[in-house]
Amino acid sequence: MTEPLIELEGVGKHYGSLLALEPLSLSIEDGHAPVIAVAGESGSGKTTLASLLLGFQKPSMGEIRYRGEPLHELKGRRRKAYRREVQAVFQDPFAVYNPFYRVDHALLEPLRLFGLARSRAEARRVMEQACERVGLNPDDTLGRFPHQLSGGQRQRLMVARALLLEPRLLVADEPVSMIDASLRALVLGSLRTLNDDLNIPIIYITHDLTTAYHIADVIMVLYRGRIVEAGPAEHVIERPEHPYTRLLVDSIPWPDLDVAWGRNQPVLREDKQDQQTEGCAFVGRCPSAMLQCREQDPPFFRPDRGQIARCFLHRETAQFDQSELATLLGLREPG
Amino acid sequence: MSDGLSVRDLTVSYNSDDGAVRAVDGISFDIPAGKRLGIVGESGSGKTTTALALIQMLQPPGRCDGGSATIGGLDLLTISPKAMRGHRLRTISYIPQGAMNSLNPVQTIGRQIQNVLVDHEVGLDQRAMDAAAAAALAGVDLDSRVTELYPHELSGGMKQRVCIAMGMLLRPKVIVADEPTSALDVVTQRHVMETLGRQQAETGASLILIGHDIGLMAQFVDRLAVMYAGRLFEIGSIRDVLTGSRNPYTRALVESVPKLRNRGVITGIPGVTPSLRLLPHGCAFHPRCRLAIERCRAERPTLLGSLGGHRSACHRQDELG
Amino acid sequence: MIAADRVPLASAAVSRPRSQSGLGRWGSYLARNPSLIIGTAMIAALLVFALVGRLFVDWDSAFPLSAPASVPPSAEWPFGTDGKGRDLLAVLVYGTLLTLKIGIVAGLLGVAIGTVVAFVAAYHGGWVDNVVRVCVDVLITVPTLLVLVVIASSIQSSMSTTMMAVTIALLAWREPARQIRSQVLVMREAPYVKVALLNGAGTWRIIFREMMPNLLPYLGASFVMAVSQAILASIGLEALGLGTPAEPTLGMTIYWLMNESAFMLGLWWWILEPIAVLVILFVGLFLCTAGLDEMANPRLRRSNG
């Protein structure tokens, strides 16, 4: 059996006394290709998770391994292989382009540095193919400066960049939050293309549950560095089990006059933060908080074989063993 | 219109290397007192420029070169910059996106609220000003002890609500809120918008909400205007526009927003937003429009319909209704 | 779209369909940056004066007794001569070149040292950065002329323009180091640098291919600033008599005219000419710095539609 592409073992991060990401164990193996949305507000730890996976930050605890080797000890060819296999698309489709160069630079550099094209002509052909696969006309995009393209074009070109590297994992960090609504679908579509063509998992980091609902297979909701709910996207959005997820879903302004905003719950004061160190992280804002929630951090429960929720409201149901997380997220065969 | 804001033929241009460009091209709308109008559009549609024109805050080389925006007999576009300073906050308030970052970091919230009262020569004594500040904060669900805090001690949503409190302090007749929640999380967004809505309803002001989020519009405004390439494409009650749109662009835009059904289906609008320097002939949307016919390429559609009703600019709107 | 909306009038440029060549962009940008153009023109005019002048006057005429003393401008001595019999045309031609040489050598050295220090500090981070930052902050409060006077007076016997340039460069790196360090810190976090990492680029490649090109306006502005400060410092030293007696720089000319009572003797040409050259030099350099600053700092940039 080959080593998993990426393995997180008890990986967590804190900044001083602030816990940014609670220790998490997960392995990403080749051959499974779910789109996993990691959703949460600012400060939920979703961006921390992304930058840990991309090796931009070192974990404060635990270890990340790439094909069996600790990530931060990779050298030479192994490091290069990791760089190529774990790719990303970022939020700001303008700032990812060096303003000094034409947009081609972002695609030519990796072809050159990873030795993926033997000649200029071959590089050009590979770039054109990648453009076409994300629905861009190469003649309209290549050779331009970043400011001459629309946000949607720039972002799709970033997807094309990832595509031509044939990575084994893509981290998409808020890829559409700065894109016009009418162009979002095209960017999301290009991510889907990449997911299908390369048969690789995508970690879709977002604060927007509406796009997560449509593009992701599974959603993992983070709150203050902790997973509070995870499971199939339609379950998590259509019938959320954790009070925090309910609050989030209920706060989405759906473009539907018959789905009123906050119809289920009164709005919670966002300034009513608590400094509770024991018990559930959400207890200070939770409308259903019980005494038990203040004393004890709830484990994961799995109410109906669908998603898991870290909440004592479901204490009557089966507890969920965290080592099964990869299976739940579709990263491993069940059993 | 005796009360409320009435905008006629508002036109904003700016000069560039390639000649003058129309950023806002002759748009007209009314907002009765106590009502909320949403203006949606994508980047470069002119929605923010419209807002800036109304408060005379266009940055050169942008300039307003036509039209009127009257409220109670006062034309906001033609009064002198000095007079405008007096009317800001008192007659018209502007809450920009990221307003919270405009708070002075070295002054307490209370002090900044009182500065508004002093600048506008409201003529209250210290105790009355303290009371006014506390009341303003109470109006946005903030405790009066917030007056003693500095901006960095508040969360983003709280700061944004402080800005709303300051914007509402002098009970303006018009509020222009330009993506007031764009940097905030959904839960906070809902709280801020509910606060803004309640304040507006209490003072009976007219409100313009500028934004790109049709969901937010659906939940908040009474009427919705859709802009594209500096032109007003459609305006009508929120229900008319969302469910009975007579404009293909509006329809495609509404379609492109993810909904709580048909999971996995999101459609987009192919093509790119045209450059204002090189607008297509005829209807600005025709290169991306599925319904485009020869007439759309040749002739620019005008906005049809009565001023307070449902109006759309499209040659084929009768087939859509 | 959110970012684009923040600059409402500029957002229309997003989908500009025409491709403009890089040169065209520079051309149209320069047209909106008159201070850079006027500044460059002034410095260029001085250079032309000095370089062309060199073809007509020789080095020896810039020294005493090469001409009758105190002759006002005339056909034979177009700039007149000074009290010791130097041809002022020769003095100004060679003085301009020598003074510019001091400025350019000191500026280059200063910016080079500053850039290296800045990159080491910003890239290494941690204690190295702290030490560098504190050192620069402390050194920046030290009055340049004071230190230079101490150094110059201890080595005065053998002072040449090159030595003077090196002496000035000893302190000229502080400001560039500080400015470039903060730029590098910002740039290091720029998304395009992260993309470069994902593209397999190593540290050197990121520094030279991704960061340096974007630093060019800053480096340019820092350089011009360092040049003008170095010239100012050299003139200060020379006017105090700590200059280069064997080389007729502009500063030495000022020293001589003060020392040799040009004011009392009423030799107006001797006073006005070097001052005119210095004014052109400093105003030109100032305009260049302002222009480059505007180019480097987008917030100062005039809206370009």
Image: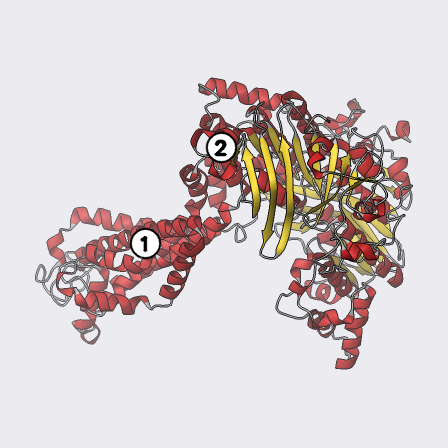
SS under mark 2: loop
Look at the picture and state if A103 lies above or below C294. Answer: above
The residue type indicated by label 1 comes to Gly
Q: Which residue is mark 2?
A: C21
Task: Compare residues B48 and C29 and report the one nearer the observer.
Answer: B48
Local crowd at mark 1 within 10 Å, few (<14), some, or many (≥20)?
many
Q: Give the residue at x 72% y 75%.
A: B118
Q: Give the residue at x 89% y 36%.
A: B243
- Give the Cα distance between marks 2 and 1: 34 Å
Residue A327, x across and y down, in percent = 71, 31
Residue B109, x across and y down, in percent = 70, 69
Look at the picture and state if B278 lies above or below C45. Answer: above
Residue B71 appears in which quarter of the rendering?
A: bottom right
Q: Give the residue at x 28% y 49%.
A: C47
Residue C274, x across and y down, in percent = 25, 62
The quarter in which the N terminus of chain A is drawn is top right
The residue type indicated by label 2 comes to Ser
Q: Is residue C287 visible?
A: no
Residue C110 tag number: 1
